[in-house]
Amino acid sequence: MNRANSGVDDERVLESAVSKVKRHVLPLFIVMFMVNYIDRVNISFIRPHLQADLGIGAAAYGLGAGLFFLTYSLLEVPSNVLMQRYGARVWLTRIMATWGVVSILMAFIQNEMQFYIVRILLGAAEAGFFPGVLYYFTQWLPDGARGKAVALFLSGSALSSIVSGPLSGALLQLHGLNLHGWQWLFLIEGAGSTLLSGFVWFWLVSRPGEAKWLSADEKRVLVGCIKEENSSRDAYRSIHVSAFKLLRDPQIVLFCFLYFCIQLTIYAALFWLPGVIRTMGHGLGDFQVGLLNSVPWLISIVAMYIYAALAARWRFQQAWVASALIVAAIGLYFSTTSLPIFAFISICFAAIGFKAASSLFWPIPQGYLDPRISAAVIALINSVGNLGGFVAPATFGFLEQHTGSIKGGLYGLAATSVISGLLVFFARLTPKEAPATLVTNE
């Protein structure tokens, strides 16, 4: 009887501890993710200013936008290893402080080469933030509570897509001290990130046992629960394999290709949508462009939840991903029209498609993969997908520089979406054990 009562009491204590953890860290992480996302893509709103003030053309802009993702992808894993060594409080503070400082440096660039260097440094500074937060959740939240926490954290990306346009448009109106509006944008947003890093230092705690806002019982039960789950996982731990071995499986290659295509479209829209909006009317100012830039992302967020609900009710994941990709293809194709308003409406439909496809895609590899290699494969898929952030803006910039139009790029993205929509039906959903050549537990 006492054991039963003790078990019930521990469940209540665990529930209380989890609730406190969410209240203490989730709002901060959501704000950090929003700031992270805004500092990454704010250059999309200043492209005409870079060209007018510094002579940075379309090709240079596209290359600079993409260079961020090379160092970001390359340094993600080393950054996460260092976080495990130094602790979340130290490392997440370091990440945010350095990306804030580098963002401020963008205000003082004077030529293409400096633009490239700062974008490379920004990718290096931001590397590890996203996986670092996910790792933090594994140390603070039991399995049953982690999924909802991650979903709420990811909402920061959606919110920043809506907020970034009006915010950047408003900051571009600032002038003074011989600084242009785009320079004030980087100074203010970079300073905001740096100041927020100071709050992170004082607010975050690396380990549950160090949290003063948890009672002794809450620490004991929470730490014990997570330790027990980790011990259970050790009996069925992940296999450490190289990317080359993973890519021997055609299904894994297909997953990488599909996610790369999806991310290719998303990043093309992120960095070039403000330019498309400017063609809708010569009288549009920076603030109006920023407001209109929020519309496709707001619509896409609603569509993502509708798609998710439909996919949960009628289960045929490949068909839902394919339908979303076809919607994206149709929107991209018709966005090339010479009628600006119709082109904007088409971009809204495209956003519905590629944002929904991005969220609907992940259950497919997660359902197929052996749990022992799932972590490694998901990291590989995500890294390959991030390369779309380099290829898309660099290609679009080259096309505009040499042809005077991005129509060729939009047609290419439409064709890529159609091809991906067809290939997704070759993706397997059924669980599969790790190939014998990969099963080499250490």
Image (spheres, rainbow, N blue to C red):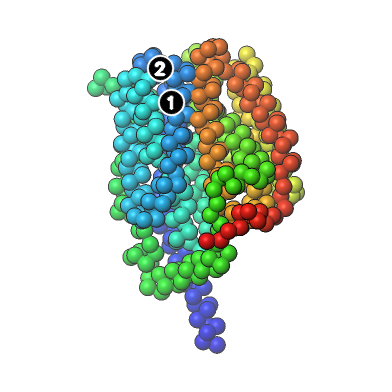
Residue drawn at 54 percent across, 48 percent down? 242
Q: In this view, does 130 lie above or below 55?
A: below
Q: In this view, does 442 lie to the left or right of 91?
A: right
Name the amino acid type tagged 1. Gly
Q: Residue furthest front?
A: 437
How far across and how far down the image is residue 356, in percent?
63, 39
Is residue 436 in view?
yes
The residue located at (64%, 45%) in the rendering is 248
Residues 194 and 402: in front is: 402
Residue 61 x %, y %: 44, 22
| Pointer 2 local density, CA inside 10 Å: few below 14, some 14–19, many at least 20 | many
User: Is 159 or 105 nearer to us in this picture?
Assistant: 105
Which residue sits furthest left? 177
Locate the N terminus and report the quarter of the image it occupies.
bottom right
- Whole-angstrom CA distance, mark 1 to mark 2, is 10 Å
Residue in the picture at 54% in, 21% down? 396
Is residue 183 visible to the viewer in this orientation of the structure? Answer: no
Count of labels shown? 2
Residue pointed to by mark 1: 64
Mark 1 or 2, nearer chain start: 2
Front residue (pair 408, 156): 408
Asked whether, in this view, residue 333 is left or right of residue 173, the answer is right
- For the residues bearing labels 1 and 2, Cβ distance under 8 angstroms: yes
Residue wearing tag 2: 56
Q: What element carries label 1?
A: helix
Q: Where is residue 364 in the image (x, y as percent from the top left)?
A: 67, 47
Residue depicted at 36% across the width and 29% down the height: 118
Question: Percent position (x, y) of residue 203?
Answer: 33, 54
Horizontal side of 89 relative to 164 (left or right) equals left
Residue 388: name its quadrant.
top right
